[in-house]
Amino acid sequence: MLAVPLMPAAPPAPFDPRWIEDVTSPSVSRSYLFGSFLLQPERQLLMNGAEPVRIGGRALDLLTALVERPGELIGKQELLARVWPRIFVDEANLRANMAILRRALGERHAGPPRFIATIVGRGYRFIGSVRTIGARAGCGHCGAGAA
């Protein structure tokens, strides 16, 4: 199991404006901003303020699937097929990686979720506000054109 560092008590520093220039460069095809986080799927990178967030690849794939379609219910089977293609895995793997992802995003058991809502028995929904930067062309999962 991956060890996820505890989140600092103080909120992270706001985004550095240079990041916006970096994420709009031609080498980065798409990036997502939500809360204090920046996700760059092609770089397998999640930043919280100025700090990289250590998180496994499967959890990053889950996050990418959710932020590509904010507000939409994404079923458990769809997430399993996307994150573990051509491999049979138990739903417990999905729940475990979702728990890792939630901890990395600073969500706690107590209190309402900030980013990921569980729709019991059905799947998950990204409920945070998402800003997309860069082209989304080539994203085989979201079906969108350029942003």
Image (cartoon, grey):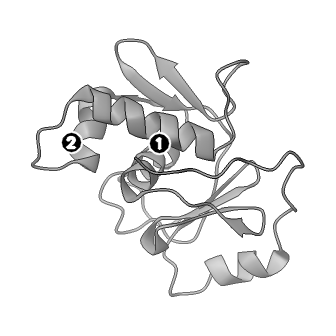
Relative vertical location of residue 57 with respect to residue 110 in this rendering, above or below: below
Report if the CB atoms under discs 1 and 2 are less than 8 Å apart: no
The image's mark for residue 105 is: none
Q: Which mark is residue 81?
A: 2
The residue that appears at 25% across and 38% down in the rendered structure is 80
Give the residue displayed 73% in from the left and 77% down from the top: 19
Q: Is residue 25 left or right of residue 29?
A: right
Residue 103 position (above or below residue 147): above
Is 29 drawn above or below residue 6 in the view shown? below
How many numbered discs sit on the rendered protein?
2
Q: Quadrant of residue 70?
A: top right
**Residue 48 falls in image quadrant:** bottom right
Type of amino acid under label 1? Leu
Q: Which residue is mark 1?
A: 66
Circle 2 crowding by C-alpha within 10 Å: few under 14, some 14–19, many from 20: few
**How much space separates mark 1 and mark 2, taking CA atoms?**
14 Å
Quick one: label 1 or label 2, which is nearer the N terminus?
1
Q: At which x and y percent is residue 134?
A: 57, 71
Q: Nearer the viewer, residue 138 or 42?
A: 42
Q: Position of residue 79 (x, y in %)?
A: 31, 38
Q: Position of residue 27 (x, y in %)?
A: 50, 87
Say what amino acid the circle numbered 2 marks: Ala
Q: Quadrant of the C terminus?
A: bottom right
The residue that appears at 22% across and 48% down in the rendered structure is 84
Dot 1: what SS?
A: helix
The answer to which quarter of the image holds residue 77 is: top left
Specify whether 21 is left or right of 23: right
Element assignment for label 2: helix
Spot the residue most to the bottom: 26
Relative side of 42 to 52, left or right = left
Q: Residues within 10 Å of mark 1 (few under 14, many from 20)?
A: many
> Residue 95: x percent and y percent?
38, 29
